[in-house]
Image (spheres, rainbow, N blue to C red):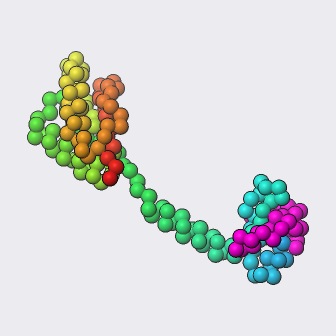
């Protein structure tokens, strides 16, 4: 809240450089801010008395937006990439899937490996565990297992996260 939006009777005033100006009636604080061609901005409404700062509100808002934009630019969105394996996967296909997973982990994304069991394959879920263990072993230098292989219904899933650089 700024200037006329502030409803307190008395406020603690801080100047634009951070120096304490003391506790004073709201009207005299507004006049002081007007004399300096600045705004009276409520910083801590829960304090007793509320704390107000004399500052250029437009400049403050601009600086805050600039800071938030910079912080947003520096954020990295981590995606979850899925790689589907099968119980009886060939060695070349397995190597191809491993190289795709290495690329995803190098980009900083998480990898979800999944195996879908069809028909009689459900009787041999231990083979799926072996494939998942082999997949995790092949990627140990690029990523670590976040969630170990777990059977959920007819599919088995495991999640890998990239290693910290």
The magenta segment is 1-28
Q: Which of the 4 quarters of the picture holds residue 110? A: top left
Look at the picture and state if 147 lies above or below 62.
Answer: above
Look at the picture and state if 42 lies above or below 36.
Answer: above
Does the stretch in magenta take in 12?
Answer: yes
Q: Which quadrant does the N terminus fall into?
A: bottom right
Look at the picture and state if 68 lies above or below 16.
Answer: above
Viewer-proximal residue, 70 or 141?
A: 141
Left or right? Give the position of 24 relative to 73.
right
Residue occupying image coordinates x 88% and y 73%: 28
Residue that sits furthest to the top in the current view:
123
Viewer-proximal residue, 132 or 155?
A: 132
Left or right? Give the position of 74 relative to 56.
left
Residue occupying image coordinates x 40% and y 54%: 77
Residue 158's spot in the image, x, y percent? 31, 34
Residue 133's spot in the image, x, y percent? 23, 31
Residue 73's spot in the image, x, y percent? 45, 64
Residue occupying image coordinates x 77% and y 54%: 46
- Can residue 5 be seen here? The reply is no
Left or right? Give the position of 22 relative to 143.
right
Does the stretch in magenta take in 116?
Answer: no
Residue occupying image coordinates x 44% and y 62%: 74
Residue that sits furthest to the front in the current view:
19
- Can residue 165 be seen here? The reply is yes
């Amino acid at each position: 809240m700024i200037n006329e939006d502030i409803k307190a009777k008395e406020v603690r005033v801080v100047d634009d450089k951070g120096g304490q100006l003391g506790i004073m009636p709201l009207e005299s604080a507004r006049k002081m801010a007007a004399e300096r061609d600045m705004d009276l901005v409520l910083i801590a409404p829960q304090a007793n008395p509320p704390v107000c700062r004399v500052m250029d509100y437009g400049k403050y808002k601009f600086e805050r937006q600039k800071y938030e934009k910079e912080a947003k630019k520096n954020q990295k969105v981590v995606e979850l990439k899925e790689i589907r394996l099968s119980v009886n996967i060939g060695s070349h296909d397995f190597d191809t899937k491993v190289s795709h997973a290495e690329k995803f982990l190098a980009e900083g994304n998480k990898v979800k490996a999944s195996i879908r069991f069809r028909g009689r394959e459900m009787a041999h879920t231990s083979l799926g565990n072996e494939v998942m263990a082999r997949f995790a072993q092949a990627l140990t230098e690029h990523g670590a297992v976040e969630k170990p292989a777990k059977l959920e219904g007819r599919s088995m899933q495991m999640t890998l996260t990239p290693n910290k650089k």
